Image (tube, rainbow, N blue to C red):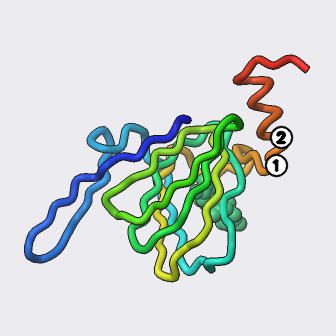
Amino acid sequence: MDIKLIRLQTHGDERGSLISLEHNSNIHFDIKRVYYMFNTRDDVRRGCHAHRHLKQLVVAVRGSCRFTLDNGQERIELLLDNPAQGLLLDSMIWREMHEFSEDCVLMVLADQVYDETDYVRSYNDYIEIMKREFWNVTA
Ligand code: T46
């Protein structure tokens, strides 16, 4: 699956901790947009879509949430609960976020500006695109 968990270097001293996200140092794409989610209820599911082209790095800067990630062939679950860990999500990965802790702040760095046409919001459509464009399955 085209995902990677990367360790982000923490600069720590007696004052506390600092993590820097920097183009060509630990972020290997052009950062065109940053957004963050907070105040998410623990009984909701966010995401539930894939992106045709977008690449993103996701960091739980505070608290935790679970990710369900799916490439149409395998499905994995992972807990994001460490501000020194970044989840690199490539395009065409189906993602769902759930079980948000009350204090969760999820920050996302993206390589494209917001574009609703990049979203694939139906799982059936997602599988059809994967079959047609990535698995070379002819119906
Ligand atoms: C993703 C996961 C991890 C904007 O106006 N600009 C933005 O940059 C974004 C991301 C969203 N919006 C608006 C569109 C919706 O009216 O904010 C509202 C909530 O967005 P959405 O329902 O798409 O949020 P999530 O949590 O389902 O998904 C988000 C990102 O959209 C998505 O790209 O990969 O987080």
Q: Height in image: 94 above or below 35?
A: above
Is residue 62 shown left or right of residue 124? left
Q: Name the residue under label 2.
A: 125
Q: What is the count of numbered marks?
A: 2
Q: In which quarter of the image is the N terminus?
A: top right
Residue 101: image location, x then y, percent: 51, 77
Q: Height in image: 32 above or below 35?
A: above
Residue at the (51%, 63%) spot, across then down: 35
Please name whichever residue, 69 or 61, is drawn nearer the observer in this view of the structure.
69
Q: How crowded is mark 2: few (under 14 residues within 10 Å), some or many (20 or more)?
A: few
Amino acid marked by disc 1: Ser
Q: Is mark 1 on a helix, strand or loop?
A: loop
Residue at the (21%, 59%) spot, across then down: 10
Residue 31: image location, x then y, percent: 43, 47
Residue at the (50%, 40%) spot, across then down: 3
Residue at the (50%, 47%) spot, across then down: 56
Q: Residue 122 carries which label?
A: 1
Is residue 129 shown left or right of residue 34? right
Q: Distance between the residues labelled 1 and 2?
A: 5 Å
Write down which quadrant ligand 1 falls in: bottom right
Please name whichever residue, 43 or 83, is drawn nearer the observer in this view of the structure.
43
Q: Residue 102 carries which label?
A: none
**In this view, which residue lies farthest toward the left?**
14
Is residue 92 shown left or right of residue 8? right
Please name whichever residue, 61 or 98, is drawn nearer the observer in this view of the structure.
98
Q: What element carries label 2?
A: helix
Q: Residues within 10 Å of mark 1 (few under 14, many from 20)?
A: few
Residue 43: image location, x then y, percent: 67, 77
Is residue 121 shown left or right of residue 83? right
> Image quadrant of residue 41?
bottom right
Residue 45: image location, x then y, percent: 68, 67
Do the CB atoms of the residues marked 1 and 2 lie less than 8 Å apart?
yes
